[in-house]
Image (cartoon, rainbow, N blue to C red):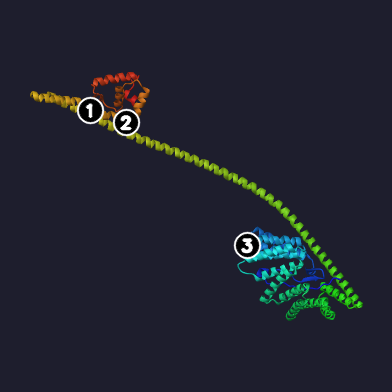
Amino acid sequence: MRIFFLVFLLMRVAFGQIYENYSSLGWIRIQINSSNFRIIPNEIQPVDVDTDRVSVIHRLKEEQQIYILHNNFEQSGEVCLKIAREYSLINDLEDAVHYYFEALRSFENCRNAIKLVVALHGIAELNIESGNQEIAIQYLQKSFRVLSLVTRRNDSLIAKTNMLMGIAYGYLEQADSAMKYFDRVLDYAKMSGDNEMQAGIRNNIGAIYSKLGRLDEARASYNEALTIFKNIGHERGRAVSLSNLAYLSLKEKKYSEAIAMYEEVIPYFLINNDLAYLETSYSNLSEIYSLVGNEHLELQYLKLYDQAKDSLKSSEMKQLMLEKETRDELQKKENQMQLIEAQMKIVDQQNRIRGFFQIVLIAGIVVISIIGFLIFRNMRVSIKNEELKKNLLVVEKQRLANELTYKSKELENFAISVVEKNEFLEVLRQEVESVEGTNKDYEKLVEISKSIRHNLYIDRDKQELHTRINELHGGFLFKLNEKHPDLSKSERKLCSLIVLDLSSKDIAALMNISAEGVKKSRYRLRKKLQLESDDSLNEYLALL
């Protein structure tokens, strides 16, 4: 026959303002016989399944969507924790795990390490309940790593992590590892003054000692737990501690002592309808009376054991049915929400398409307007630039014309001054030649006259004049030579002097010919230029 005994474990730790409602593992039951050792979460107490829980989950999901829309990751994570706990209460572990992971992502986004650990604890607890101890340990190790990075040490969360590690290793029947973590929690309970937690951990440690065959240490640990529960008035803890001591007496073959203890705790379990503990107590009493040879009481307690077992199964069935009803109701709500969401998505998509086309139309109008404006502005700028260029050309042309007029006038004045100087020299020569005197004076005057005549023909001022004419009227001479390449050098010089609008007399003086010679030269030039008799030579040359 299998032998059961129950260990009390209540993880009642304050986790700060946000975690005040964070559920602990609550009561833990350890099932032991000669071949196995494992820790099993106590069955969830039956809950009346009505629309309240369905409505709560539905409302929480709506809240979560609002927080997601506003990128409020911290509040979204909080709501996900609440949803996960609601699902865990109806044993919908798949959805519970899903929302714990949603909480993890939210807390990672807002970089809240403490809340991240709370979500990791939730995932670890669900894996412990599902029998996935190795996975649970991985998440708990991650919790330790996160807590080691937190600036301000959080002893309560560290204790919770150690508690869950001890439970996971208990499931894996690794008693030494479980004991190590339970000892850490016990140290925290002593330090924080949490007597209820301390007593619960001592019961768990007593179970470990019992499994290891260290019965004296187990009894001492159970007695310490019993004393604490008595002192704080915790009746259920006292009853569980007594049932654990009773099991030790059974193992030590102290049957009378074990019977007395079981008979003391059974009334409490009956009053509180604690079927799991009644089942274990009746089973152990039936075995004791079998061992002492009292068949009547053995059968009596075996019958009570069967009744408690049937009642427990019936209770479990009711619980399963209620949980199924709740899940079905939640599924209906989910389907309705999905249908509404699908309809909203269709309407939203239609609105987006309509809005998109409106935006495209408005954008098209705006783009066309901008392009038109830019084209118009560029045209105006181009026109203004052209006008500015024309004005600049006009100004520049006027400047050049003024400069040309000034230089032409200057050149004309220079030419006139050269003519006047030559005329003066000629008059001076004639006067010198008219002077009479001695032979010696005459010879000297002749020398002076020759010198004057020579300067009249090789005057540097004339050369400078022609140089200036070439500089000022270089374009004119180029065009003249291009249009009339057969003109001689003297004819081109004559054209340059005519352009200066000099008189025939001045031209004659500059070219060292007579006025009649200038007239003949002008006649020959007109013929070479193929001008009619009524054509003006001066105007023709000025227009080149």
Within 10 Å of the Cα at label 1, are there few (<14), some (14-19), or many (20+) other Cα atoms? Answer: some
Question: Measuring 26% from the left and 28% from the top, which residue is drawn there?
Answer: 463
| Residue 164 x %, y % | 72, 68
Mark 3 → mark 1, Cα distance in angstroms: 103 Å
- Three-letter residue code for mark 3: Arg
Residue picked out by circle 2: 471
| Residue 258 x %, y % | 83, 79
Residue 189 drawn above or below residue 371: below
Residue 103 drawn above or below residue 525: below
Q: Nearer the viewer, residue 254 or 24?
A: 254
- Three-letter residue code for mark 1: Asp
| Residue 522 x %, y % | 29, 21
Q: Nearer the viewer, residue 309 or 177?
A: 177
Dot 1 falls on a residue whose secondary structure is: loop
Q: Is residue 20 visible?
A: no
Within 10 Å of the Cα at label 3, are there few (<14), some (14-19), or many (20+) other Cα atoms? Answer: few
Residue 185 drawn above or below residue 537: below
Q: Which quarter of the rendered picture does the N terminus lie within?
A: bottom right
Dot 3 falls on a residue whose secondary structure is: loop
| Residue 41 x %, y % | 77, 68
Mark 3 → mark 2, Cα distance in angstroms: 87 Å
Dot 2 falls on a residue whose secondary structure is: helix
Q: Earlier in the sequence, mark 3 or mark 1?
A: 3
- Three-letter residue code for mark 2: Glu
Instruction: Give the numbered dot on residue 111.
Output: 3
Q: Which quarter of the rendered picture does the C terminus lie within?
A: top left
Which mark is nearer the camera, 3 or 2? 3
Instruction: Give the numbered dot on residue 459.
Output: 1
Residue 271 drawn above or below residue 325: below
Question: Measuring 83% from the left and 69% from the top, which residue is drawn there?
Answer: 315
Image quadrant assignment for residue 225: bottom right
